[in-house]
Amino acid sequence: MAVRACNRRVFLGLLLFMLSSVLAGCSPDNVTAVGLGPDRSPMLQNCGSWFRAVHVTDQGSGRVVWSAAKRSDTSEFGVGEVIVGVLPDKDWVEEAQLSRDPRPAVWRFAIEFRASGPQTIDIADGDIVAGELYVPGKSGHISEKAFRDNVCGYAPPISGRTLVAAVGLFMLLGLAIAMFFIHRRDRSASDPHWVPSD
């Protein structure tokens, strides 16, 4: 009986540890990065499904380059990626057609989100590069993987190797405790006068 209760505690502890690791990554921050998509169009990426509208202008002249938004009669959820000139989802409508020429020297992105206030990002055309993302407030460019893992926090809190080692350690500990109680039970069964010392 004691062995079963002990094993149950070890299992529940391991389950709670793994559940807390998963839940820690469920709510990413609302962070936006700018990269280069197909046809050299700027691409906005977000940690969650937050984008509900994107209004793009030439920062110097004020000319509208492109504008699109999610229809108000649809679900509250947005999208996690928008490529300038491409509707990201069937629930989105184009408010201003793409007019990329002449290409802006500085792009201005006015963004509306699902659960927070609007954001405006100004970025020089030369800072929008292929294969890397620019995150306002961070220095330099980062890879898409670094954005997902480090900025958005999608990387697991511990590596797979560490998790395997921790599970192995929990199993060994559980086995050692089980063996202790089995040995104690067997000894008390074979020697009725033996009194365990606690």
Image (cartoon, rainbow, N blue to C red):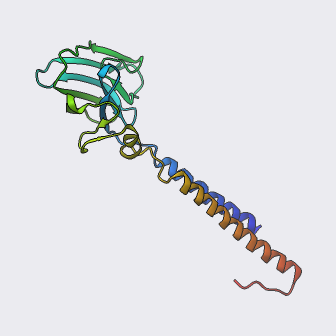
Q: Is residue 104 depicted above or below 184 in this figure?
A: above
In the picture as drawn, the residue positioned furthest to the left comes out as 61
Q: Is residue 126 left or right of residue 14?
A: left
Q: Is residue 191 left or right of residue 73?
A: right
x, y percent for residue 13: 60, 60
x, y percent for residue 52: 33, 26
Residue 154 quadrant: top left
x, y percent for residue 163: 56, 55
**Closest to the observer, 101 or 194:** 101
Q: Quadrant of the C terminus?
A: bottom right
Q: Is residue 58 depicted above or below 98 in this figure?
A: below
Which residue is located at x 30 percent, y 22 percent? 40
Which residue is located at x 35 percent, y 44 percent? 151
Residue 65 quadrant: top left
**Closest to the observer, 100 or 86:** 100
**Closest to the observer, 30 or 72:** 30
Q: Is residue 69 left or right of residue 28?
A: left
Image label count: 0
Residue 110 quadrant: top left
x, y percent for residue 102: 17, 16
Which residue is located at x 59 percent, y 55 percent? 164
Is residue 18 visible in the rendered image? The answer is: yes
Which residue is located at x 26 percent, y 31 percent? 128
In the picture as drawn, the residue positioned furthest to the bottom comes out as 193
Q: Quadrant of the N terminus?
A: bottom right
Is residue 114 visible in the rendered image? The answer is: no
